Image (cartoon, helix red, strand yellow):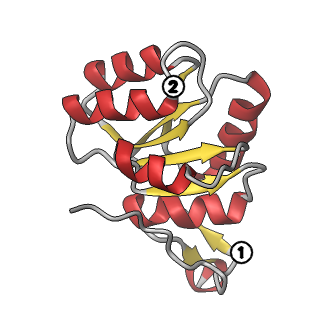
Amino acid sequence: MRELLFTDFSGFKVNKLYDWSGKTILIAEDTDCSFLYLKTVLRNTQAVILWASTGQEAINLVREHREIDVVLMDINMPGISGFDATVAIHSIRKNLPVIAQTAYVHDNEVELCYASGCVDYIPKPIDKHLLLEKLGVFLGAGVEKSKREI
């Protein structure tokens, strides 16, 4: 049985470099400004970024792009919800990690994330350092800047 990670990043360091060359991240986000924020946070990671503005588009992109390594899934998507899109994505690629993102936190939201197949959750507004650490679980941990510069 899969469990949500909900890793404790309370002691994470914000002074890291991330090199995700050769990795692909699908951002399923219906608002332009939220997508641009996430793309900006990820710009120095060298990851390829794909964008889906609807749940159906996210499903289609997963079907078309086998190279996707992780999905950031907005739960409140137009048409097909992020929960339903996650279920559909896992019917295509069972082990593809999906991290839920949402501003609407309800009592049963963690349960719904788990039930749909999400492996973790990040609340909005998204803290850029927390986002990088959570993605690092699947794409490779960051390296402290001082060690990388040596």
Q: Indicate which disc residue 14 carries.
A: 1
Query: Where residue 70 appears, x then y in whole percent?
Result: 40, 45
Q: Nearer the viewer, mark 2 or mark 1?
A: 2
Q: How many marks?
A: 2
Q: Is residue 19 visible?
A: no
| Mark 1: amino acid | Val
Query: Where residue 66 appears, x then y in whole percent?
Result: 24, 31
Taking the spot 39% from the left edge, 56% from the top edge, the residue there is 119
Q: Is residue 120 above or below residue 93?
A: below
Q: Quadrant of the C terminus?
A: bottom right
Q: Is residue 20 above or below residue 23?
A: below
| Mark 2: amino acid | Ser
Decide which of tag 2 and tag 1 comes sooner along the chain.
Answer: 1
Q: Indicate which disc residue 96 carries.
A: none
Q: Is residue 135 visible?
A: yes
- Closer-to-camera residue (9/138): 9
Q: Classify residue 56 as left or right of residue 87.
A: right
Taking the spot 46% from the left edge, 71% from the top edge, the residue there is 141
Q: Is residue 57 above or below residue 44?
A: above
Taking the spot 41% from the left edge, 27% from the top edge, the residue there is 85
Q: Are marks 2 and 1 in contact (CB under 8 Å)?
A: no
Circle 2: is it few (<14), some (14-19), or many (20+) Cα within 10 Å?
some
Tag 2, which secondary structure? loop
Marks 2/1: CA–CA distance = 32 Å
Taking the spot 65% from the left edge, 87% from the top edge, the residue there is 11
Query: Where residue 112 appears, x then y in whole percent?
Result: 46, 46
Q: State the residue position of label 2.
A: 81
